Amino acid sequence: MVVRARLCDDERMVTVLIVDDHPGFRDTARRMLERDGFDVVGEAADGASGLTLARELDPDVILLDVALPDWSGFDVAERLRIEGPDVVLVSTRERADLGPRLEAAPALGFIQKDELTSDAVRSLLTKKR
């Protein structure tokens, strides 16, 4: 699903691409982020589609599941590092379960899915600045 970017008060809203194989999670994350001022420009159910949409849509942030049906989110994040959008990794698993690969991933950070909030995403974006 692709949605065109919008402008808000002459400032560009933060655009987000959600890459996750669970439609229910994508829907919940989209509604929460849009309600809180983010512009969700697209969704993808696997890594290959996520990479394609990242190139087409040029989002500011990619909310990226660690476990995808075709590639791991870590592999997708590594490929995205070259292309520029910020990556926030998400998973149902806890941080400690993901080991050193999580710490080495080229991402702004990690949010466990049941702790995902717009404020948590904003906090990671603020730390970058």
Image (cartoon, rainbow, N blue to C red):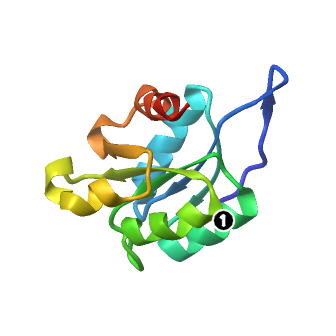
Residue name at image x 74 percent, y 64 percent: 56
Residue name at image x 43 percent, y 52 percent: 107
Front-most of 70 and 128?
A: 128
Point out the residue furthest to the right here.
Answer: 10
Front-most of 9 and 86?
A: 86
User: Horizontal placement of 82 versus 6: left or right?
Assistant: left
Task: Report x, y in % for residue 70.
Answer: 42, 80
Circle 1 packing at 10 Å, graded few (<14), some (14-19), many (20+), is: many
Residue name at image x 77 percent, y 43 percent: 5
Task: Report x, y in % for residue 115.
Answer: 29, 35
Residue name at image x 44 percent, y 45 percent: 108
Front-most of 74 and 48?
A: 74
* Total numbered labels: 1
Question: In the displayed structure, would residue 88 be above or below residue 98?
Answer: above
For the N terminus, which image quadrant? bottom right
Q: What residue is shown with label 1?
A: 53
- The residue type indicated by label 1 comes to Leu
Question: In the displayed structure, would residue 88 be above or below residue 78?
Answer: above
For the C terminus, which image quadrant? top right
Point out the residue furthest to the bottom here.
Answer: 70
Task: Report x, y in % for residue 87.
Answer: 49, 51
User: Horizontal placement of 101 versus 7: left or right?
Assistant: left
Front-most of 128 and 123?
A: 128
SS under mark 1: helix
